[in-house]
Amino acid sequence: MIIAQISDTHIALDTPDADERIEDFERTIAALNVLDPTPDVIVHTGDIVHNGLQDEYAQAVAILAMARAPVYVLAGNKDNRANLRAAFSACGYLMPDSEFIDYAIEDFPVRLIAVDTLSTGSNKGDFCPARARRLIGLIDAENTKPIAIFAHHPPFEVPVEPDPLNFETPEMMARLRQALLHTGRVVASFSGHVHRATAGHVGNITATAVPCIATTLRKGNYPAHMKRCPVYHIHRFDPHWGFTTETRIVGTGPSS
């Protein structure tokens, strides 16, 4: 199974770099469309838009509609749950009566479970007891397949950030980590938010964070020729060896 992960496109219509953010998003989808083999699925791990506005989501939906692979989205700290749910309601996997943007996709050899870490009062993540119960319920709903978890905020410390903790409290991150370790079937955790590539662990679970697609917001040192090249991750799952993650650079070749 091949999963393409993108994150933090931050589509906005009122910023000086609005056109660059849209172009970065469009170029990334175009690059995914010519990959051989084609990804089985594309997962966007949140901060789809920057202000949570309906017109921003309309732009994002139009870009994602060009993708050849099925697309699933999560809520990031810049997203608005109601507007996100309305924009992607036709896709069928977001429950209209749910308080949170969380769900499980059962169509693949690996179960894909989306976690909602959005806080309405902070850019940092929230993971309350209600969300922990929902996640454990999703994990326990099927007991044969391995599970890949997708969440906007990484469930591990990122020491290169000004604040290594990306949740409002240490207890919130610990609650998420405990839920991931509830069963041995969670084999990987994928996130975004920190706008740079980084990795950690939750117990024996490998956890990674992908850079932001919006190159004007990306953190870390890149050579000059890569300043306007979006970066995404390809996660390949093998039933014997688990997941491997590859960084792909948009604009460096015909199948980038």
Image (cartoon, rainbow, N blue to C red):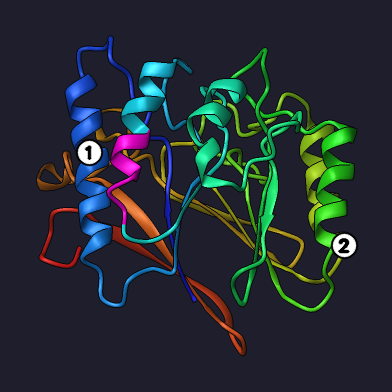
Q: Which residue is mark 2?
A: 140
Residue 219 appears in the figure: no
Q: Secondary structure at mark 1?
A: helix
Report the mark closest to the observer, 1 or 2.
2
Magenta region includes residue 94: no
Residue 221 lies left or right of residue 238; in this view the side is left
Q: Which residue is located at x 81 percent, y 59 percent?
A: 139
Separation (CA) of disc 1 from disc 2: 38 Å
Quarter of the rendering containing residue 212: top left
Residue position marked by numbered label 1 in the rendering: 24
Which quadrant: the C terminus? bottom left
How many labels, in total? 2
Q: Residues within 10 Å of mark 1 (few under 14, many from 20)?
A: many
Q: Is residue 96 above or below residue 206?
A: above
249 to 109, vertically: above or below: above
Left or right: where 97 falls relative to 19: right
For the record, the magenta segment spans 61-67
Q: Is residue 189 visible?
A: yes
Q: Residue 126: percent from the left, percent from the top?
A: 73, 28
The residue that appears at 84% across and 33% down in the rendered structure is 171
Q: Residues within 10 Å of mark 2 (few under 14, many from 20)?
A: few
Q: Amino acid at mark 1?
A: Asp
Residue occupying image coordinates x 82% and y 37%: 131
Examine the image and state in which quarter residue 102 appears. top right
User: Tag 2's secondary structure?
Assistant: helix
Residue 42 located left or right of residue 28 = right
Residue 231 or residue 137, whichever sits in front: 137
Q: Which mark is residue 153?
A: none
Q: Position of residue 191 (x, y in %)?
A: 55, 47
